[in-house]
Amino acid sequence: MADMPSEFWAGWIVVITVTSFIALIWFVRDLYRAGDQDTGREDEVWDETLREGARPAPVWWFWFILALMTVSVVYVILYPGLGSYQGVLRWSQGGRIAERFVDYDAQFGAERRRLQALPLAQLEGDSDAMQSAWRVFNNNCTSCHGRDAAGQARLFPDLTDDSWQWGRDETQILETIRSGRQAAMPAWEPVIGAQGVEQVADYVLGLSAGDSGSPANAEGSALFLQFCSACHGPKGSGQPLLGAPALDDEAWLYGGDRAQVIRSISQGRNGVMPAFGSRLDDAQIRLLTAWLSAGARIPDER
C-alpha cells in the first residue's frame, strides 16, 4: 500500500484543506469585525426570555485561533498534510517504520541470526532461548492450545505428547507453524450407513485398546480396510504427510469415548491450524519449534 494518496485524492485533499482554512479565516475576520458594529438587534427577544446578545466574542479567542492557524501552516509546510506533498522534512509513517526496523536489527539482529544458526538440540538447552520461546507461545498460541500447551475444548491438540497429527520432527513443526494446516476428515455415514459407522467405531476403539482382533470387530475391520486405511494406514498407525492421525494409541483430539468416535466417523471433522508465517519471523518460529520439540515445558518464571 502506497504511503501517499493517488493524484486524484491528493487533489481533493488539497482543495478541502485550503478551502477550509480560507473559510476559517473569513469566519474569524467577519466575527470580530461584526463585533464592533451596532446591529440594532440587542432588544429582540425570542421565546419570552431569550434575548439577542450584543457583546462581542472575547479577544483572546481571536489570538488563540490565530496561534492555532499559524501552527497549522507550519505543520503542513514541514509534514505531509496537503495531498501528496511530503513536506520539507519528507516524513512518512512507512519511513518511520523502516527506521525502526533498522534500529531493531542493529540492536538484536546479530543475536537473532546466531539463534537461527544453532542446531535445535542446542537451542533446547539454552534457558534464555527457551524463556523467549515460551513468551512467543504465550503471546500467540495459548488461546487455542492452553497455557500449558495441553490442548483444550476437544478441538485443539495436546502439544506436550508424542502424538502429532502432522509429524513432530523439526521440518514438520516448522511447516505447521509457518504455513498452517487444514485437516479434512470426510463424513462416512452417507457411504457406509449408521450401522457401518458403529462397526468401524468399535473396531477403532479396539485398535486404541489393543484388542482390534476380536471376532466381534470383523465387519468393522473389513470396512476400515476398505474405506479408512488409505489415509490412516492398514493398521491405523496414521500418515503425518496427510494429516491422518494414528488410531492405535490413546491420543484423541475430539474425544475417545464411543459417542465422540461415532460422531467423528459419521459427520467428519475439519480442523484448521492458522498460518503464522506472516505474524512471526523466522527466529521466533525456530525458537517456538525448539520449545515444542523439547516437550513444551513452561520454564521457571523469573
Image (cartoon, helix red, strand yellow):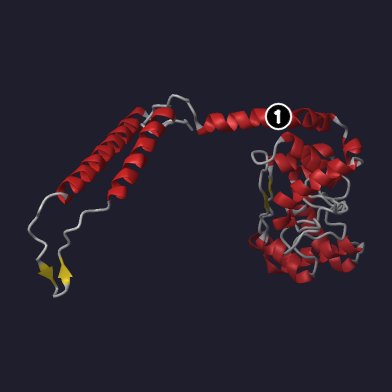
Residue drawn at point x = 75 percent, y = 46 percent: 136
Q: What element carries label 1?
A: helix
- Residue 204 percent coordinates (x, y): 82, 61
Residue type highlighted by circle 1: Asp
- Note whether 195 is above or below 139 in the view shown: below
Left or right? Give the position of 216 relative to 103. Answer: right
- Residue 294 percent coordinates (x, y): 88, 46
Along the viewing direction, whichever of 144 and 245 lies nearer the viewer: 144
> Residue 146 appears in which quarter of the rendering?
bottom right
Is residue 11 in sight in this rendering?
Answer: yes
> Residue 180 appears in which quarter of the rendering?
top right
Is residue 168 in sight in this rendering?
Answer: no
- Note whether 220 is above or below 59 in the view shown: below
Residue drawn at point x = 39 percent, y = 27 percent: 85
- Residue 196 percent coordinates (x, y): 73, 65
Farthest residue, direction left: 40
Left or right? Give the position of 212 relative to 136. Answer: right
> Residue 173 appears in which quarter of the rendering?
top right
- Residue 225 percent coordinates (x, y): 80, 54
Left or right? Give the position of 167 relative to 65. Answer: right
Label 1, residues with CA under 10 Å away: few <14, some 14-19, many ≥20? few
Q: Identify the residue position indicated by label 1 in the image.
A: 105
